[in-house]
Image (spheres, helix red, strand yellow):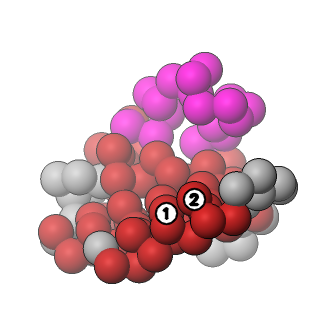
Amino acid sequence: MHIIDKQKHMETFRARLKSVNSDGLNIPKIPADYMLKHRGSLIGKHFKTLVQIMPLIVFDLVPKDVHDAWVIMGRLTVLLWHTEITDLDVYLVSFRTILRF
């Protein structure tokens, strides 16, 4: 957020965050104004939501290495929030593939 704020892209970020359609994401409606107001102290469910959509929102607002970091964090978050792992071998292959990114 510091990079976005520093480069004067916060309004673009706010508009994009508010326009995300969460219907297909298996998450509740995204409380964009709340997340931006409390961006330094979000709880886990808000972080989980943000980390998965950030690459789509900030693709042209941050340097490539920062965008790549958001992509990796999003992929890791999906794996780390699993409540049940049915095939550990497949899970570990996915995990290792992300870490090689």
User: Percent position (x, y) of residue 47?
Assistant: 64, 61
User: Percent position (x, y) of residue 46?
Assistant: 69, 54
Q: Is residue 26 left or right of residue 32?
A: right
Residue located 57% across and 23% down the image: 24
Residue located 30% across and 73% down the image: 101
Cβ–Cβ under 8 Å for marks 2 and 1: yes
- Tell whether position 25 is magenta: yes
Separation of marks 2 and 1 at Cα, in angstroms: 6 Å
Crowding at label 2, few (<14), some or many (≥20) Cα neighbours within 10 Å? few
Along the line of sight, the residue nearer the viewer: 66 or 100: 100
Which disc number belongs to residue 46?
none
Q: Is residue 3 left or right of residue 52?
A: left
Q: How many marks?
A: 2
**Pointer 1 residue:** 94
* Amino acid marked by disc 1: Ser
**Pointer 2 residue:** 90
Tag 1's secondary structure? helix
Q: Quadrant of the N terminus?
A: bottom left
The quadrant where residue 85 appears: bottom right
Tag 2's secondary structure? helix
User: Percent position (x, y) of residue 34?
Assistant: 68, 48
**Vertical order, 58 against 42 (above or below):** above
Residue range (magenta): 16-33
